[in-house]
Image: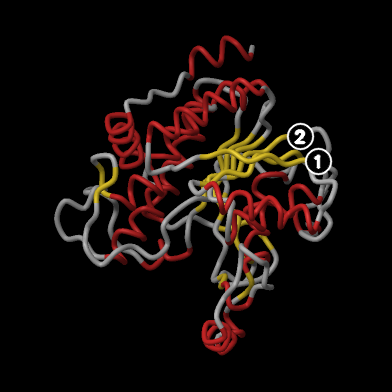
Amino acid sequence: MARDEWDPRNLPDLSGRAYLVTGATRGLGYFSCEQLVGAGAHVVLTGRNPNRLVLAKDAVKRTHPDASIETLLLDTSNLGSVRAAAATVRARGRLDGLLMNAGIVHPAKTREVAGGHEKIFATNVLGHFALAGELLTPLASARGRMVWVGSMSTSLWKHVPTDPELVEGYTPWRAYVQSKAATTMLALEADRRLRAHSVPVESLVAHPGYSTSGRTRGIRGVNEPSRLTRFFDNLQAPITQSKDEGAWALVRALVDPLAEGGTMFGPAQVLRGAPRSATPARRTRDAEMSADLWHACETATHVRWPFERVRRTAS
């Protein structure tokens, strides 16, 4: 399949494959699940709210009555929840892909703490770092893939996350953009380390462009924007797209058989469009700073990715 022939509305057959999606009860995560089950995959739909998990699963079933889907409680801001969910997934067997989508997009005006860590960094970064490490064994067994969700906003940010916990200088914008810069850096650093240890898992990053709920079809319990939200979002129609279109890049990074580890996908027009290869922001490609961030995440989560053990098992 040539790279420029990818059709997000006609995915390859994913029958027999299993994927886990974090933050799957709304937005990009939900629509990624819809697209995956529509191609025949089994999907583990995760979220931190049990009621929303039920609503999201029911919504998927309304669209795809024969969908192979299950739900799992997972709060990425809580490392105990991450470990418990990972243990459940490992016990259930095959895992072909991990889509790390969960995250806080609209941070609080003042710095908050979750589990002893700045909340945005804990939710968007640390939880996924720990989850990917905990699921490295089943991913390697399936020669699978992990996809980290970045943001186009990182290209607008001149700084690097040297103070990822934002002990000083917290602002909502800085918290969000730094978390997405960190996510991208970890995705690329994971690829370097996976290759260095000959672990058969690919690490990629994807971003959804400018995707809004007001330009997305209404789904009971999943996407119910107000009339005012729809009005203002539709005013931005020339530069925005729907959440289901935003999910295209994430899904392509996860399932395109020609996609390679260490690469990034995003909309062709940056803000919107069909999924195409993209270039991570220059500062996120700094290997030395990424290695420092990796060590900081290891310290914060007490998770060491089991590269050597996984390589021996997979070989």
Work out which residue is located at the far front of the displayed protein and give it: 51
**Residue at horizontal 58 percent and vertical 38 percent from the top:** 72
Q: Position of residue 4 (x, y in %)?
A: 76, 59
Name the colour scheme.
secondary structure
In this view, 189 is above or below 249: above
Work out which residue is located at the far left of the displayed protein and give it: 168
Relative side of 258 to 154, left or right = right
Relative side of 109 to 263, left or right = left
In this view, 137 is above or below 273: above
Q: Which element carries disc 2, helix, strand or loop?
A: loop
Q: Position of residue 260 (x, y in %)?
A: 64, 41
Q: Nearer the viewer, residue 163 or 1?
A: 163
Disc tally is 2
For residue 306, the mark is none
Q: How busy is the neighbourhood of tag 2: few (under 14 within 10 Å), some, or many (20 plus)? A: many
Residue picked out by circle 1: 14
Which quarter of the rendered picture does the C terminus lie within? Answer: top right
Q: How busy is the neighbourhood of tag 1: few (under 14 within 10 Å), some, or many (20 plus)? A: some
Q: Quadrant of residue 63?
A: bottom right
Say what amino acid the circle numbered 1 marks: Leu
Q: Which element carries disc 1, helix, strand or loop?
A: loop
**Residue at horizontal 66 percent and vertical 45 percent from the top:** 254
Residue picked out by circle 2: 17
Q: For the residues marked 2 and 1, what is the alpha-carbon distance in whole angstroms?
A: 6 Å
Q: Quadrant of residue 282?
A: bottom left
Q: Position of residue 220 (x, y in %)?
A: 66, 66
Say what amino acid the circle numbered 2 marks: Arg
Circles 2 and 1: CB atoms closer than 8 Å? yes
Q: Position of residue 182 (x, y in %)?
A: 37, 48
Relative side of 120 to 34, left or right = left
